[in-house]
Image (cartoon, grey):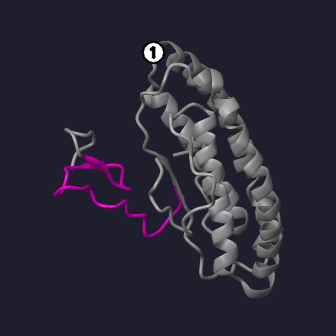
C-alpha cells in the first residue's frame, strides 16, 4: 500500500491508496460499504487542447443530461412523497436518482477538462458506483428516513447553501487557473483539481441530505 503508485500495474482502491499488482490483472474496484463517495481518480496529465474544446465535445452529454434530468425530476417528486408516506425511498427510485447524479459528475469532469476520455452515454451502476470510470459517485440507500424531513431540511441546509455559494466562487477561480495550467503544461495542479472535486462532493452531500439521507453534511467541503 502506498499514497502514490510505485510502478506499472499499481491500482487505486476506493480508500484512495495505491496497491501493487496482483497476478496478471488488478482487482476490480470495490465500492464503499457506507457513506457518500464522490471522487475522481484520473491522471493529472490532460491533453493541452482540452480546455479549448471540452465544453464543445460535451454538448451531446448535456443533451442527454437534459433528457435524463426530466425523468430525474419526476423521480425526485416520487421520492418526496415516498418519504412522507413510507419513511423510505424505493430501491428503483433511489437508484435512478443516484445514477443521474453519477452521470452528471462524469460529464462535469469531462466538460471541465479533467480527463481525455468521454464518459459513457448511459446511466450505469446501482446505488454504488461500478468503478468503470475515474469519476465515481455512490450514495447508499437509507433504510429509514425522517418522515417530515423533506419539508424542513431545506431550512436547516441554508447555511450549507451559503457556504457552497462561496466555495463555488472559489472553485470557479481554481477552474480558471486550471484552464491555463492545462493549456500550457498539459497537467493539472493536484491541489487545484482536488479543491474542485471537494466542492462538487459537498454539493452532492447537501443534495442527498435534502431527500436521500438524514446524515447532515459538514459545513465545509472535505
The x, y position of residue 54, in whole percent, is 63, 30
Q: Position of 73 compared to 157: left or right?
A: right
> In the displayed structure, does residue 151 sit left or right of residue 101?
right
Residue at far bottom of view: 86
Rendered residue at 43%/64% (across/down): 31
Q: In this view, does 114 lie above or below 215?
A: above
In this view, 174 is above or below 140: above
Secondary structure state at the residue bearing disc 1: helix
Can you tell which quarter of the image residue 180 is in? top right
Question: Which residue lies at the image location 56% right of the left edge and 41% below the top edge?
Answer: 118
Q: Is residue 29 highlighted in magenta?
A: yes
Q: Name the one closer to the observer, 53 or 85.
A: 53
Crowd band around label 1 with a 10 angstrom C-alpha radius: few (<14), some (14–19), many (20+):
few
Residue at numbered disc 1 = 185
Q: Give the range drawn in magenta.
A: 10-37
Residue 43, percent from left and from top: 40, 35
Query: Is residue 68 shown left or right of residue 41?
Result: right
7 to the left or right of 171: left
| Residue at position x 45%, y 15% in the image | 185
* 84 and 101: which is toward the camera: 101
Examine the image and state in which quarter residue 30 appears.
Answer: bottom left
Please identify the dominant SS of the magenta region.
Answer: loop
Q: Is residue 15 above or below residue 177?
A: below
Amino acid at each position: 500500500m502506498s499514497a502514490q503508485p510505485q510502478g506499472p500495474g499499481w491500482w487505486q482502491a476506493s480508500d484512495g491508496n495505491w496497491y501493487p499488482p496482483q497476478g496478471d490483472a488488478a482487482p476490480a474496484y470495490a465500492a464503499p460499504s457506507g457513506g457518500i463517495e464522490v471522487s475522481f481518480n484520473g491522471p493529472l496529465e490532460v491533453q493541452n487542447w482540452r480546455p479549448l474544446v471540452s465544453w464543445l465535445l460535451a454538448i451531446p452529454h448535456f443533451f442527454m443530461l437534459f433528457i435524463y434530468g426530466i425523468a430525474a425530476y419526476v423521480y425526485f417528486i416520487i421520492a418526496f412523497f415516498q418519504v412522507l408516506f413510507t419513511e423510505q425511498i424505493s430501491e428503483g427510485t433511489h437508484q435512478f436518482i443516484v445514477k443521474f447524479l453519477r452521470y452528471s459528475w462524469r460529464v462535469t469532469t469531462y466538460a471541465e477538462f479533467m480527463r481525455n476520455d468521454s464518459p459513457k452515454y448511459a446511466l450505469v451502476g446501482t446505488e454504488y458506483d461500478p468503478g468503470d470510470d475515474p469519476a465515481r459517485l455512490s450514495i447508499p440507500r437509507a433504510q429509514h428516513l425522517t418522515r417530515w424531513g423533506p419539508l424542513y431540511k431545506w431550512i436547516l441546509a441554508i447555511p450549507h447553501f451559503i457556504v457552497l455559494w462561496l466555495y463555488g466562487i472559489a472553485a470557479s477561480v481554481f477552474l480558471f487557473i486550471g484552464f491555463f495550467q492545462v493549456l500550457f503544461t498539459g497537467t493539472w495542479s493536484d491541489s487545484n483539481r482536488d479543491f474542485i472535486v471537494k466542492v462538487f462532493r459537498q454539493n452532492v452531500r447537501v443534495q442527498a441530505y435534502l431527500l436521500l439521507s438524514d446524515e447532515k453534511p459538514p459545513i465545509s467541503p472535505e
